[in-house]
Amino acid sequence: MPRLLAPSQSWLFSPRVDLAIFAGSALVSVALVLGAPWLGAVGDTPPWAWLLLVVCVDVAHVWSTLFRTYLDPVELRERPGLYLGAPLAAWAVGVLAHQISPGTFWTLFAYVALFHFVRQQYGWVALYTRKARASTAERRLDAAAIYAATVGPVVWWHANLPREFWWFVEGDFLPGLPAWMGTVALVLHAGVLAAWGLFQIVRVVRGEGLQAGKVLLVGATWVAWFGGIVLARDDFTFTVMNVVLHGVPYFVLLFRYSRGRGEEGGYGAAGVLLRAGLPGFLLFLVVLAFTEEFLWDRIIWHDRPGIFGSLDVQLAPDLLALVMPLLALPQATHYVLDAFIWKPGRQPALLARLGWAPRVSSDGPPIATSNESAMAVQGRSD
């Protein structure tokens, strides 16, 4: 009888955690969208949802990168050029784009953000394939599936502009793509995902097991991107689908990394913050996120006096060209650094801190983490 589940290949964190952050995020998003009429959230995102989804999830997850980078004195000493150069380069490019026009700034910012969102989903599936030691052909098919689930709806979006929602500001994406290209993109994306799904069935028939966590990830990604772009008819739906699946798993990744890094000692301010556990970790990030959005609203947007008050700051256009890229710097730096800080080949200790590899003892052989030990037991039983 075919084996339905291959335990050593099925989960990234654990069955409970993977189900919660991937399948759970998608299900919560769908539930919020379906319940929008009863929540008073049809159309524009209401203030409570904006605070919960944008501030406490989207903006806060950006700040969580601090635990991987600027709050770690050892990390800063190891790669000072990266941590100094990334924000300086991001700010300089932002100023240059804003000098051309504010529209140029927002278009550039939107496409960098879009690239980051797509690549994060690819990064998750790449971790699954790495842990499963998948073949080159399977890795390529997995990559094709995740890109189809994300890029396909985005191409359709560009071919159907304008929509009732936008990434950052109205008109940030470039129009002009013919409608037929959107249709072709959806057909191609369906074909790739169908081929990928068929391969998963073949794996089970051949007795190789179902990589349940990876299947949940790809499925949740498709639900969020297709539902949040192609099926969405208002800003609330797009925001829910766009934010939850992107931010929640990242919180889990950073908190897990932080705990592993904290066990090594010398973690500086991050180690102090972690003494309060997950509540302290999240509260610290939410405070930073709220402060950032307060500055955006009082200096730039002036549209949420009920949340941030009415003490507005008016800047001259030349000064605005310097300040707006500065306000965008946390996000921009997050986008840049994320392309460098999750590469285990450059930093072998990364996998051990995440619990996905043995931790090396200073006076003996490698010490297996509980997750690694479980994998070894499962491997022998297979």
Image (spheres, rainbow, N blue to C red):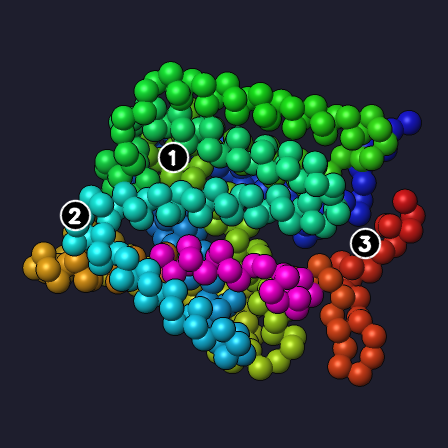
Q: Residue at label 1? A: 238
Magenta part of the protein: which range? 332-353
Q: Is residue 75 above or below residue 374?
A: below
Residue at point 78%, 62% (across, down): 370
**How far is the residue under mark 1 from the one under mark 3?**
38 Å
* Mark 2: amino acid: Ser
How many residues crowd around disc 1 within 10 Å: few (fewer than 14), some, or many (20 or more)?
Answer: many
Q: Quadrant of the N terminus?
A: top right
Closer to us: 377 or 160: 160
Location of residue 322 in the rendering, given as x and y in whole percent from the top left corner: 19, 62
Classify residue 107 as left or right of residue 25.
left
Classify residue 374 as left or right of residue 261.
right
Residue at point 83%, 75% (across, down): 365
Q: Residue at label 2? A: 101
Q: Residue at label 3? A: 375
Q: Is residue 20 visible?
A: no
Q: Is residue 311 magenta?
A: no
Sequence order check: which comes first, mark 2 or mark 3? 2
